[in-house]
Each structure stands twice: as structure tokens, then as C-alpha cells.
Image (cartoon, coloured by chain):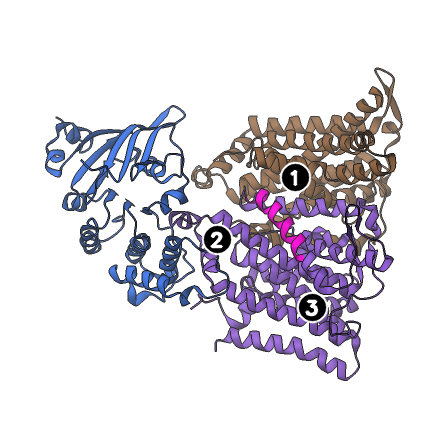
Amino acid sequence: MTEPVLETRGLVKSFGALRATDGVTLDLRRGEIHAVIGPNGAGKSTLIKQICGNIAPDAGQVRLLGRDVTQWSTMARARAGLARSFQISALAMEDTVLQNALLGALGASGSPYRFLRPALGRRHLRDRAMAALDRMGLADLAATRVATLSHGQRRQLEVAVALTLAPRAFLMDEPMAGLGSEGSLALTRVLDGLRAEAPILLVEHDMDAVFALADRISVLVYGRIIATGTVAEIRANPEVREAYLGEAP
Amino acid sequence: MTPLLIVEQVLNGLQSGIMLFLMAAGLTLIFGVMGLINLAHGSLFMVGAFAAAATAAATGSFLLGLGAALVAAACAGALVERLVIRRLYDRDHLDQVLATFALILIFSEGTRWIFGSFPLYLDIPPALSGPVTLPGGIQYPLYRLFLIGVGLVLAGALFWLIGRTRLGIRIRAGENDREMIAALGVDIARLYTLVFALGAALAGLAGALVGAIQSVQVGMGEPVLILAFVVIVIGGIGSITGALVGALLVGLTDTLGGIFLPRLFALVMDPAAATQTGAALSSMAIYMLMAAVLVWRPTGLFGART
Amino acid sequence: MTRETLLNALVLLALGLLPVWAHLSDEPFTITLATRAAILALAAVGLNIALGLGGLVSLGHALFFGIGGYAMGILASHAQDYTPIYDGAFTVPGTKSMPVIWLVAVAASAMAALLIGLLALRTAGVYFIMITLAFGQMAFFFAISWNAYGGEDGLSIYVRNSFPGLNTLVPIQFFGLCFGLLCLILLASHLLARSPFGLALNAARQSPDRVMAVGLDPKRLQLVAFVLSGAVTGLAGALFADLNRFVSPTMFSWQTSGEIMVFLILGGVARLCGPVIGAAVFVLLEHWLGGLSEFWHIWLGLLLLAVVLFARGGLVGLIAGRARAHD
């Protein structure tokens, strides 16, 4: 068995009396989309923050490509190949679409301390940024300011910036949120093709997308994973139906 | 170095610390509730001092002077809040800094225009002048003791106001969630004006009280303002307790540093060089304290930790 | 050519040519005013790197301005007294050479910016403002109590320092030197804004989370910007001291910090020539209004208030419209 690309082992994080994550163990394997679903308040965003390094767990480990990265900063994890997209777009709103994508390429290049030659004049950065925009269908909007983009276009740009990093694993925080059905469908197609490049840990509310995409699903309730399995297994799991879908067993 | 000197300096430190608290409490309250950084808070300190000096000179009554300081600073605060400050609540900190810097220019030059460039003097009332003998035979100015007493009473009243009254509950609610208190039917605009005027009144009163032991002049407010910022950085933004602890720490460090650092250096240097180095370093002591707190706890001793 | 580019060209042309005209018609005071405007503009160009690009609201830039000034004052006063600065295992003499003074001014203010930046960047927002203001005040009090270099009275330098190949005592030549430096550093800051570093810094101001998510450290970007910013303002301080042939603790005062920021806001934050226009307007107002009324700061205050409340984007914003994204 090959080692998982991304892995959490027994992550615990409490805020006062509340255990936001209570021993979460997950793994993301090569070539898969692993969806994490759960009702609001299940601890999904706390889990994401621990995986990305925004908050430190009280106990447990985060492992990336076989290395224990629990003590690493957000930046170090990103450089090691973990790319994330944000639930609420965290883009440079005053800048253009291309500039945002260039930032990703710059991060991937690891050398932002160049002071005189224009960023746009750097062929390899620009090519990398444009390639990512092209894949997300944003190439025509390269010179547009992010502030004037539609909600859906910003979501696409979120994914495009993650693409520029050529990551080893994606962590996507509700990429479908606020997209119309058409937008969801288009993004679903893109993510579908992406898993061959790097596996995706997909935290998502949109069940249609999850059932269409996921190789495996984990269900998070009150900070605990109550089930992990294929779509069919999860659909059939009575505990999940009770806890998550609100059905009596 | 005698124990008497130490006691005296500790009292001096307490006195300047507690006056600093009156400034810092208003600043931290205004920041906590409205999210506003107000550079013009020092101008309100000055307004209080001038109002007190002018009124006391005209009426001969120190008490009337203090009353005038309270009223003048509170009115100036309320007026400024209505005219300018309220437009700044949803602006970024840069706009707030600039607009309140502009207010400093207007207040300072306006005061110079009205009162001229020469300092005014506010006399300590006869009943409070002269030294008293403390237990242990220490002679200490009565007025400074009075300042410590008044400051402590005001601090107590402020803690009571914030912690125990309806207004205090609203203020604390405002710090947490603006929309919530609006939903509860509290008139936010009035609450903000009130909080600002309260902060202004505290600053004005501090200006009047301190005005009697230093000269009352244009520009007297800003050094105190900057010290109050140091207090807030040390204590933590938005915390009244932090403001009190920070103010006392800064007051004590400042006075004790000025006395003891030169003596400390005299142990290892020749006297002239020690005086020189000690004086230079003691002027920096409170900033060193601030730097140390920043290294140890970046959001201040009592600030919210993220 | 956009309106802003045109405006930039016109402003620099006007500032460059006015002293030439004054020189020809023998009005040295006008040259001094223009030199003052150029130097203050340079100080604000420095602040613009931290504030405009980096979003760091520093209210302590007087510290770097003062360090530059005192670097000049200390080196030149030792040179004019023929006393060494340090005389021990080796000897460090004073100097009257501008290039050496500039180098010392830049290095010293960059070092100070590094130390203060390391501390102040542990926090953000309003803490940053208060901390930079406080450190500025610390330097002010230190300068006052530093009797070896004039204490409260400051230091006078009798003869302007020298620059190879120029006679710096001739006003127009000294102006040319200051203006040349201003143009050079404007060009550098123009390139900086478009460079990879500028791109990353700009993003760190708008969305630090994003910058971290692509593997870059926003605090480190901001620290580098703060150091560059402090160094440029320090250089301006050295020139300012040379213009007045005098340094005093006033250079460190919080008013100086406020004024440097005012230049920037009058002109327009994050606009290339915003600081130049702001400083020029300030010097003109100071000259004209100061002649009309002793209390001209009231009018300055009202003008500033009006700009902040009603004309965000400053004068450049009024004339050339909102900032566009860099292409």
C-alpha cells in the first residue's frame, strides 16, 4: 500500500468546553477525491485550519507526503505542496486576475525578493499563471480587476491560483458555495479532471457535486468522523442517515 | 539612597500613572466600542486644562475650574464626534489617523489663537497646597496625594460604570456586536456620542488636574497621548483593567527609572558619564518596557489573544 | 499615456525647471523652497513604500528622518572640529563627504527600521500605529537627553558638506543633487511597485491569508518593505540636515511623522508622484499661508480634514481619477 499524500491522525482541538475536533483521523490517497461532509458546526472549518496550519491542534498529527508537518507554518506547508482554496474568497481585490494568478506562480517559484524587473516580464511566471487561468476559462479576463468579477468567476480564480502552485494535494473549502447549478456543473468537471494531477480533499455542502465526484466520503459530526466509505456505503449507512440527513433509523 | 526617597518616588509614579490611566481609559474605551484610533484625545486633555485655568483665573475657584474642564472637554468631544468622528467609524485606520491629526492642528492653533502662545498657570487651591507629613516622617505635597485619591475614585467609578450599570452593559455589548445592540433597540449613534464624550471628559479632567502642577500650554496633550498609547500597547487594547495596570507600570517605570538608572550606572562608570547615560536611557525606559511586553505578549497583558 | 503619467511628467518638469528659472532671475530663496519640497517629497516617497504598497500605517517615520539627520550632524560635526568619532583600537574620523554621509544615514536608518519592524510587525493595525509613534517619541527624548550632540539645542554645521565635482554651496547645484536623487528613487519605487516583490507586498496588504496560502510570508515581505522605506526616509533626513546645516530633536518629533504622512495624503497614497505633489503643495501653503496668518496650521488642518473626508485619493486622485491596476 502506498503512503497517503495527506493524513491526519487523532486531531484534537478544544475551545473551552467545546471539542471542535475530537480525534479526527483521515487520509487522502493518490488519485482520489475524498469529500468531507457534515452539518454546520460539525468542526469542518476547525479541521481545515489545523490541516493548513492556521491553528495548532491540542493533540494529534498532520502528515504531508509522509512527513510530520504538525509544527510547520502555513507557508511551509504550502511550499511543501499543499494548496488550498478559501470558502470566502481571499483574493487581492484591487489587483487584476492575472496578478492574482502571478502571485501563485511567484509563491511556487519561491523567490519574491526581486525588486526591479517587472513581474509580468518574467516569462516562466507569466506562462504558469496564464496556463492556470486558461484551464479555468479565465484567460480572457486576465486584465480584469477581481473586484469587478462575478461571484462564480472569483471561485474559479480561487481554484486557478491553487493550480499555479502545481501542488501535491489540494484542500478545497466549499468551492461550490454560491455557484449556480450551471457553475457547479462546470467546476465539477474541472475538479474531476484534476484528481489525476493531485488528490483533492473536498469539504463541500453541495451533495450533488459530492456524490458525483467523491471516491470516498467521510462524515464529520460533532468533531468526530462517524463514517468513511464509498458513495454507496455512505448512502446506505444508517448512522449517517440519522445524524446527518436527520432521518430516524 | 534612602527609603524615604523610594517612597516619594513610588508616590510620584503612582500619581503620574493614575493620571495617565484617565487618558488611556478613554482611548481604549473609544477604540474598543467604536474601533476608532483618536489622536485628538490629547487635544481634549489640553482643552480641559485651558478651560480650568481660564475659569479659575476668572472666578478664583479651583472647583469651578474643574467643573468647567469637565463640561468643556465633554462638549468639545460630543461636538467633534457629531461633526467629524462619526464619519470615520467605517473608514480604515489611516483615514482615522489623518483626520484626527487634522483635528490636533485645528485644536492647537485655535487654542493659540484664543489664548496666545504664552502658558497659563493654574494655581493649586490653598486648601490643597503645601506638604503633608506621612507616617514615617515623609513630607509629600498634599496636592499630589489628592491627585492619587481623585484618580483612584474615578477609576473605581469607571469600573462600576462599565461593570454594573445599564450603560456599561450596552457599552460592553457594543464592543462585542454592534448589530446585536442595534437589534435590541439601543440608539447606536447616541451611545457612540456618549462614550466619546465620556472619554473626552476623563481626558479633560486629567488635563485640568495635571495643569495645576505644570504649565498649561498648547502642545501639552500630545506627549501624554503618546504615553497613553504606550500604556494601551502594554495593557492590551479595549481592556480597562489593562489600561490601569499599564498606566501604573508606565508611571512607576518612568519616575523610578529617572532616579535609579543614573545611580545604577554610577556603580560602573564615572559620575558624569553615569548621569549622562542614565538620563538618556531613563528617557527610553518605558519604551524598553513596551518592547519587552511586545516580545513576550504581542497583544498586551490583558488584550484578547488570537 | 494615461492622465496620471502625464501629470507625473508635468509635476517633475515643473519642480525641476522652477529653480532653473529662479537661478536665472537670481531668486535663491525660491531655489531653497524647491529644494525643501524635493527633500520632503523624498521622505514621503520612503513612507509610500511602507504605507502605500505595504499598507503599514507608520506614524514613526520621523525616527528615520531624524536618524538620517543625526548621521549627517554627527559625522560633519566631528569633521569640522577635527575630533575623531571613535579613537581606540582604531580611529573613526568624521567626514564632510556627502556620499559617505548618505551611506551611513541609509545604513543606520535601515538598521533601526529592521529592529522596530521586527517588534512592531508582531502586531498589526492600530497597535502598529501606536508602536511606531511610541518609538519615534523614544528617539525624540533620547536626542533631547544626548548632550554630547547638542541635546535639546541640536547641532549646527557651518559649511555644507561636499560632493565630488559640485559646489554644493551654490543653491542650484545642491538642488540638482537633491532633485536627481528624488528622480532616481522615484524611478526605483516605480519599478518596485511592478516587481515580483511589489506584487507580493501588494497582495500581502490586501489578503495576507492568500499570500500565506501560496507559501510566502507576508510579515517578512512587510519587514523588507519597512526597511526599504526607512532607508529612503533616512536619506531624505541627511539631505534635509544639509539643506538647513542644522539638526535638532525636532526632526524626531511626532509632528514630523505626521507631516510626512500628510504630504502623502495630500498628494495621494500609493500614487507614484503623490508624495511629490503633496510635499510641493505643503511647502507652498507653508510659504503663502504662513505669510498671511500666524495660525496657518488651522487652514492646513481644515484642508487635510476635507481631503480625508471628501477627496480620498488626494490631489492626484482628483486630477487623474482613481488608481488603476498596474497593467
Amino acid carrying label 2: it is: Arg
Q: Quadrant of the C terminus of chain A?
A: top left
Please give the residue where the numbered disc 3 appears in the rendered image. C37
x and y percentages locating residue A29 in the rendered image:
21, 40
Q: Which disc is residue B85 wearing?
A: none
Secondary element under disc 1, as helix, strand or loop, is helix
Q: Does residue B36 appear in the picture of this structure? A: no
Palette colour of chain B: brown
x and y percentages locating residue C216 in the rendered image:
43, 49
Q: Residue at x 62, y 78 (%)?
A: C13
Which chain is in purple here? C
Please give the residue where the numbered disc 2 appears in the rendered image. C205
Counting other residues with Cα less than 10 Å from the Cα at mark 1, is it few (<14), some (14-19), or many (20 or more)?
Answer: many
Palette colour of chain A: blue
x and y percentages locating residue A1 in the rendered image:
18, 35
- Could you tell me which chain the residue with mark 2 belongs to? C
Q: Quadrant of residue C274?
A: bottom right
Please give the residue where the numbered disc 1 appears in the rendered image. B230
Region of the chain picked out in magenta, as a range: C106-121
- Could you tell me which chain the residue with mark 3 belongs to? C
